[in-house]
Image: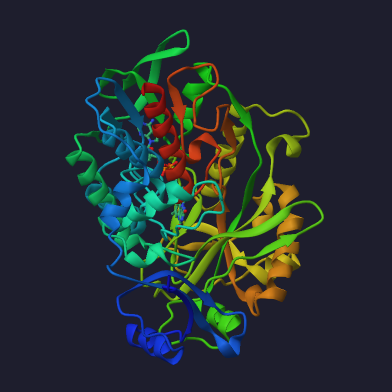
Amino acid sequence: MKKSSFELKLPVNYSYADIEKSLKKNGIFKKGVINITRQSLDARKKSNIHWNVNIEISKEKIDFTKKQSEIFNISRQNREKRVIIVGSGPAGIFSGLILLNAGFKVTILEQGKKVEDRDKDIISLMNNGIFNPNSNFAFGEGGAGTYSDGKLTSRNKHISKEKDFILTTFINSGAPEEIYSLVHPHIGSDNLKTVTKNLRESFLELGGEFCFETKFISFSSDSKTIKSVETSCGVVDLDYLILATGHSSFSTYRELIKKGVHFTTKNFALGFRAEHPQELINEAQWGVSNINGLKAAEYRLTAKTDSASVFSFCMCPGGVVVPAAATKDTSIVNGMSNYNRDGKYANAAVVASFNFSEFFQREVSPLEALDKLEELEHSYYQATGGYSIPGMKISDFINGRPTGVIGETSYPLGITPYNLEELLPKTVIKPLKQGLIDFSKKLSGYETGTIMGLESKTSSTIQVSRDSKGLCDGFNNLYFAGEGAGWAGGIVSSAADGIKSALDIITREG
Ligand SMILES: Cc1cc2nc3c(=O)[nH]c(=O)nc-3n(C[C@H](O)[C@H](O)[C@H](O)COP(=O)(O)OP(=O)(O)OC[C@H]3O[C@@H](n4cnc5c(N)ncnc54)[C@H](O)[C@@H]3O)c2cc1C
């Protein structure tokens, strides 16, 4: 059989005509449709930045609807069993779609609003600092990832089928097709709102029920079996319960601990968000401030220090820093960007690994870990008396001196010069300084940037005891999936975790 896949080296602003030209130049004259199967930007040599593109020539264009339906061989049956899912983030909606395909009766309970209404609360928060405890950057339809960069990278090597399902579902819900082939795909916050709405519509078309502004409060169980959930809108009976509440729902964690669901305290990370002019990052990565055909340069940095690992996380090229608190009178930050990544600034979390038990040199219970984290997030709110965030210049933090004037940043609610050493736990200060010195050697000009606020939610601070499918220890119908369970993190791995729970329920029911 003649070969139909080819690897091409293409210019940064390549078009389909360039693909055809490159094929001809390589003596390939095969007839058919060109499908791009992989694209990665090679920027290792600044003088030769190009795309490595894998293409396949086949009879037809990739049919993502067909592809999505063929990934899991689920047969639809008329089933009476009712599954209640709490949370409409990636873990919740993807577990719901899988279960509906198998014929279960599925209801999603979401404490926040549908994305169209959530949007108004986000604007109110960004413009006027008005915080709604149930509708913000952490809570509402689509979960924490709705207002994000929508990066779809995941380092988990054991979720290839789930990842295929997630990407094809996103594409069929309005995400750009390139997310299927790009090595670093991202959807962008502007597209994510449409994608979230379309996912809801697919869920409803399949017969699912969505209850917005409905908060899970507690559950009733008979020994190992959950019988019903108590919600802000009444009691609902169920056969299976999937919790997909994310890692910011402290009231849910506290209630679950009270009800005997077992958690442990885990390693997580603390730090701040670093921001630079995007052109500075472009210069450092590409050698020039702009390249026609490329959006904005990314970076991912790590540093090994004497006492902790320091890493950049969730980099948002051309993005903005946002007030991402989930609880009133607390202040934390995160980042988001639109599809075009065309904002003036680049931001990323810079964090050091941290563990409450190590910090206090004694066993810290999950409940105490939640309290301590909330106290820390509250101290940032108190430092400025609101949603203006404390911040300083990176060079000043490294050199242990105060910052006088910070200048413009993308954060919408103002920045107050503040010595962040006074707010962060002592054990992360030295590693963060060492990490920033190391980053400044790797990315020219990094030390001129600004650091701001608290980054405390790169992952959960506690972890539920469960099996690999999400079934909680001591229960036979309680699943905890996604980032809140403490076993997943990010959009793709949380969605994959939700899919695994749904598939386990299908297997058990036969
Ligand atoms: C600003 C920002 C940017 C991000 N950028 C990226 C990115 O680019 N790429 C990436 O991979 N990840 C990103 N993340 C992280 C990503 O969003 C999360 O890892 C992911 O959303 C976790 O999915 P989940 O379904 O487990 O939980 P969540 O998305 O947190 O969803 C949980 C849902 O449960 C609801 N809920 C909670 N408690 C209750 C209750 N008691 N009753 C009813 N409903 C409840 C919440 O309202 C929420 O909608 C970002 C996060 C933020 C905040």
Q: Position of residue 424 (x, y in %)?
A: 66, 50
Q: Is residue 198 above or below residue 485?
A: below
The quarter of the picture where residue 502 lies is top left
Which residue is depicted at the point 42% across and 20% down? 477
Q: Is residue 340 above or below residue 104?
A: below
Q: Position of residue 52 (x, y in %)?
A: 50, 77
Q: Is residue 111 visible?
A: no
Q: Is residue 373 visible?
A: yes
Q: Is residue 355 left or right of residue 41?
A: right
Q: Is residue 280 above or below residue 462?
A: below
* In front of the other: 330 or 475: 475
The quarter of the picture where residue 36 lies is bottom left
Q: Is residue 357 left or right of residue 288?
A: right
In the orientation shown, which residue stands out farthest toward the right? 306
Quadrant of the rendering where the N terminus is positioned: bottom left
* In front of the other: 114 or 273: 114
Where ligand 1 lies, by quadrant? top left
Q: Is residue 221 above or below residue 151?
A: above
Q: Position of residue 442 (x, y in %)?
A: 69, 74
Which residue is depicted at the point 53% across and 42% down? 488
